[in-house]
Image (cartoon, rainbow, N blue to C red):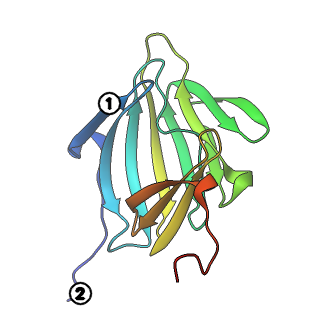
Amino acid sequence: MLKSNILMSDMESLPGTRRQTHEPFEYTKHLLTDGSENSCTVAFYELPPRKSNYPYHYHTNVTEVFYIIRGSGIIKTPEGDKPIRAGDVIVCPPFETGAHRITNDSETETLVYLDVDTASDTDLAFYPDSGKVGVLARNHYTGFFKKADTVDYYDGE
């Protein structure tokens, strides 16, 4: 008999990890898969009122899909800010056209969404507002660098 590898859970059954290290960013993440053994990362996020999840960014090798479960907010995109609300599905493809940041615009209500990301062995995350580049290996950041610090291929050789 085959053993199933199917994962099933709800947000309340998953431990939440709260992150609040820099204003105005704060969230609680309930992780189901981290992408290390699956082809995607699946997590529930809770954004408190007036907080954003991450700085405005895009990836080079990951597609992100958000399903808004409860609440409302704003997603910053290359075309400007767009309202989001419960029931919306948002697909952010790789590269500049998929740049995004989710912000809870409520004064009182928590914004809750499901985040499903494709997994990649390597990825770069670009932050247009600050000029940073993040290097990711298997969905874990290995370092951040200023894009302006680029050097010639043979520099130091």
Q: Nearer the viewer, residue 113 or 50?
A: 50
Give the secondary structure at mark 2: loop
Image quadrant holding the N terminus, namely: bottom left
Labelled pair 2, 1 in contact (Cβ < 8 Å): no
Q: In this view, which residue lies farthest toward the top?
A: 107
At x 30%, y 64%, the residue is 7
16 or 23: nearer the viewer: 23
Confirm whether residue 137 shows in the render.
yes
Q: CA distance from mark 2 to mark 1?
A: 42 Å
Q: Quadrant of residue 136?
A: bottom left
Q: Residue at x 68, y 59 (%)?
A: 95
Which one is closest to the eye, mark 2 or mark 1? Answer: 1
User: Which residue is labeled 1 in the image?
Assistant: 20
Identify the element where label 1 is drawn.
strand
**Does 142 appear above or below 27?**
below
Q: Circle 2 is placed at which residue position?
A: 2
Percent from the top left, x then y, of residue 48? 40, 23
Residue at the front extreme of this rendering: 156
Residue 88 in the figure: left or right of residue 116: right
Q: Position of residue 81 (x, y in %)?
A: 71, 29
| Residue 121, percent from left and from top | 44, 75
Name the mark on residue 45: none
Query: For the residue carrying disc 2, how many other residues have a C-alpha within 10 Å: few (<14), some (14-19), or many (20+)?
Result: few
Q: Amino acid at mark 2?
A: Leu
Residue 34: x and y, percent?
Answer: 33, 62
State the residue lying farthest toward the right. Answer: 79
* Left or right: where 2 falls relative to 26: left
**Residue, x 48% and y 10% (percent of image)?**
107
Identify the amino acid type marked 1: Gln
